[in-house]
Amino acid sequence: MINANGTQQIVDHRPASHPGIDCFYVYPAISGQFTPNSNLDIEPQETAIAELEASPFSQDCRVFAPMYREVTVDYLSIRTAQEVEIAYTSVLSAWRDYLAHYNDGRGVVLIAQSEGAQELDLLIANSINNDPSVRRLMVSAILTGWNLTIGSNGSGPFSKIGACASASQTGCVVAYNAFSQPPPSNSYFGFPNPSVRDGVAQHEQCTNPAALAGGSETLTSLYRTQLPTQKVAGGVTDGILGSIPSTSTPWIEFADQYSAACVDSNGATVLLVTPMNNATTLTAFPDAQWGLHVDDPNLALGNLVGLVQCEATAYMEAHS
């Protein structure tokens, strides 16, 4: 851990020996294959991104990170409806396999970023929101780096799954897009899409993982320093940090260096991240349209891991 005054200390985190819940993680666009949809071969990029974004949750849950036929990086900007459907069908198949062979009635947290969050957005809307038997299993959903829109009257694909407002609430969702400054009008994130659904105005969901009830609070950021490949958005050499202090530990934690609050700005709703204690101002990567997108999960990963721990306790107490 690196404190605001520059001092460092070793913090030992271990996987839970008998976790009471599961986590189902869907990774973002990461494949460098030269086809519109990837195959199911496990490559260094998939292993690296799962370690970077999902492995800390092993302190709270059994982590399942299935391969799926994602839309590959080179095709994201030109993807077709058919290619998007292939990716979603693949995630749906993995989810059904998990429920049939591994779940055994356990609570589950759904976790994803970017393209993975799009897939889980669809999965929750199509297979969980209106199915009480499956919705009962959902401890929470953590969907970062994706435009999750909610009807102003509470209608829409998440009509029965509201935003998490406390650490003891379950069956809810945490969603946000992080920026270091108000997003430009052509930003990819933060604006409701569509702005109107079935005649109802939509707004962008933003949940501050450090202050679920609202307001500003300190983030606890976690980064993996040793990965199978460094060619991973959000890794230590490709992301908003650019580089990190030298350390021999596999993880590095930043405490008391950034605060965050959900704000409305020019029609967008985003998690605005502000430096504290003379910390470096974070720079959008690769440009202002993206904001802090590539680091969305890791900026608040310590907060999110702590939140899931509290939610797991609340869920198991309620479903004992």
Image: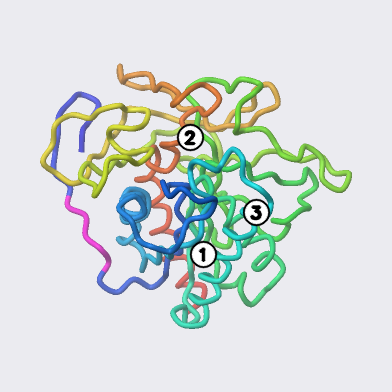
Q: Secondary structure at mark 3?
A: loop
- Please tell me in which quadrant of the rendered image residue 238 appears: top left
Sequence-first disc among 1 and 2:
1
Residue farthest to the left, as pictured: 248
Residue at 54% from the left image edge and 50% from the top image edge: 36
Q: Which residues are magenta?
A: 12-16
Type of the residue with mark 2: His
Residue for badge 1: 139
Sequence-first disc among 1 and 3:
1
Say left or right for 98 vs 131. Answer: left
Q: Tell me if residue 117 comes above or below residue 16 in the rendering.
A: above
- As measured in the structure, the alpha-carbon distance from the residue carrying label 3 to the one carrying label 2 is 23 Å
Type of the residue with mark 3: Gly
Q: Is residue 102 magenta?
A: no
Residue 264 at x, y = what percent? 64, 27
Residue for badge 2: 293
Closer to the eye: label 3 or 2:
2
- As measured in the structure, the alpha-carbon distance from the residue carrying label 1 to the one carrying label 3 is 12 Å
Overall secondary structure of the magenta section: loop
Closer to the eye: label 1 or 2:
2
- Please tell me in which quadrant of the rendered image residue 210 appears: top left
211 and 44: which is toward the camera: 44
Residue at 36% from the left image edge and 54% from the top image edge: 46
